[in-house]
Image: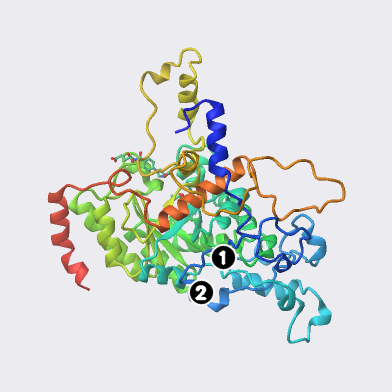
Amino acid sequence: MASTSSRTLERAVRRALQPISPFSSFASTSASAIPALSTPPPSTSSSARRVPATSQFHTSARNCSAWPAGVDAEDGMHATMSSSSESVEGGGMVGGSQERRSTRLQQSAPIDRTDAGNSKTRQQLEMPKSRPPKSIPHLMEMKRQGQPIACLTAYDYPSALSLRHADIDICLVGDSMANVALGHSSTQSLTLEATIHHCQAVYRGLFSPLLSISPNTPGAPLLLADVPFGTFQTSEEEGVKSAVRLLKEGGVDGVKIEGGAEILPLVRRLTKFGIPVMGHLGLQPQRVSSSAGYRLQGRTADEAYTILSEALALQEAGAFSIVLECIPNKICEVVSKALRIPTIGIGAGPKADGQILVTNDILGEITSPWHVVAGLAKAGVGEVPALQQPAPPGPKFVRNFVDEVLSGRVQPRSSSGEEDNFASPGPAAEGSAPVAASSGPTGIGAIRMAAIEAYVDAVRERSFPDAEREGYKIKSAELADFMKRAGPLLQG
Ligand SMILES: Nc1nc(=O)c2c([nH]1)NC[C@@H]1CN(c3ccc(C(=O)N[C@@H](CCC(=O)O)C(=O)O)cc3)CN21
Ligand SMILES: CC(C)C(=O)C(=O)O
């Protein structure tokens, strides 16, 4: 914990960040592989990224090796790229899937027309292939191979960049954004417009053209968004319209929808039209008003049976994955084994096929006024009457990965040399290269990147979550009753 003097804290930060060069994994081993930037990386330690063993399972349609020219202006890059018109059908956002991205590229931004007839374009000759984006078949294969799927939320550009850097598998523009980014007390307040607006910011981070500069940039995650409360309940048509807007205007690959039996017709309809749907069972924050607060779900045999049967029904309806929130470890384990599609757990124990947390939570961000009040009380600033009772603790399934990094409990992912990355870069000398490939973030940015990497690594090596401390139990009598009733469902 960071309850140390600022001097000790600074030393801890230095120690934790010393070996990290957040961009070192982007810098290729040979400077010539970075086409546009003139300054070679100072450290040429072979820090080639671990390629997930399943990376061959991407669908070729999503394997966009083309330089996504003109998608967005990015610093000095734009001039060297083409000037593309941003005209896109459906409201001005760039297309969603890699397929659409590359189609759009061909339509609107040929880099050099004189190459048009050549078998090898300038792109193919000079540009490195970027790593393939994560696809649904890729995630299915991860489940089959028992490789945990690492997921996080993002609501803005800097977090999206950090997630891409950490090689996250799924990036969710979750409606928890209502709480942690917009200050609402419930996710019910979130609008479709706000969700789209934030999806666009996240998209610009995940798919920034400059990221293609290195062949070592991790493949882009699957980008999903929650369909907000109130934008799919009134009719199937409205649900389809909302999902289509998230894809066309928000640029997402698919949608997540909270709910069980009542959403099956919508899930069937969307998946039939090729819109990927992730389900969400267990604790459903959009229903918080009718479920007496944020509480553990599936703690009785009855409740657990409903979760299992709804999970199977969602799979049958075409869902490609299901989030299981705040349910006992054992129930998550049974459901995960019963499904072909991957389960993504949050407060559901270590046996889910993947894990997700709210990024702000793993960074220890201030996400509640309680954090301010508690901070004042701790600092001994006058009377703080509200704190006669302690601030409500956060959910037990959250782990603060900034604490993990700063305490030295986890090791930074990449060691790249002796530079002290905590030192801020001095003012650029006149005439020096505008962007040095070596200048990674410092301060909060570096800590954020290190913490997100630590989370991804912990999920991949199964050191997160801890079954005991970060999971929930079910009474053995309820479990036995559940298993008896679940028997017939588990046969098929
Ligand atoms: N910052 C943040 N993180 C989240 O995970 C999150 C949000 N916001 N907003 C929307 C929902 C609400 N969530 C929550 C919030 C609190 C608990 C919680 O305090 N759970 C108790 C369980 C108590 C019980 O029933 O036994 C816990 O001790 O973990 C769980 C999920 C998850 N989602
Ligand atoms: C945490 C995930 C599962 C979520 O639903 C959200 O961010 O809203």
At 53% from the left edge and 29% from the top edge, which residue is drawn? 8
**Which residue type carries mark 2?**
His
In front of the other: 435 or 320: 435
Residue drawn at 54 percent across, 48 percent down: 450
Residue 6 on image: x %, y %: 55, 27
Give the class, few, some or many, for how many residues have Cα within 10 Å of label 2's Cα (few <14, many ≥20). some
Quarter placement of the C terminus: bottom left
Provide the residue designation for mark 1.
219
Q: Are marks 1 and 2 in contact (CB under 8 Å)?
A: yes
Up-down: is 133 above or below 158?
below
In this view, the residue farthest toward the top is 382
| Coordinates of residue 88 in the picture (x, y in percent) | 69, 66
262 left or right of 112 in image: left
Whole-percent x, y for residue 11 in the image: 55, 34
Q: Does the residue labelled 1 lie within 8 Å of ligand 2?
A: no
Residue 58: mark in rendering: 2
Q: Nearer the viewer, residue 77 or 187?
A: 77
Q: Which residue is drawn at 39% across and 36% down?
A: 394
Estimate the x, y position of residue 487 in percent, counting from the top left: 16, 66
Query: Residue 326 vs residue 255: left or right?
Result: left
Q: Which of 108 and 444 is in front in this view?
A: 444
Tell which residue pokes out farthest to the right in this image: 431
Task: Choose the circle earlier in sequence order: 1 or 2.
Answer: 2
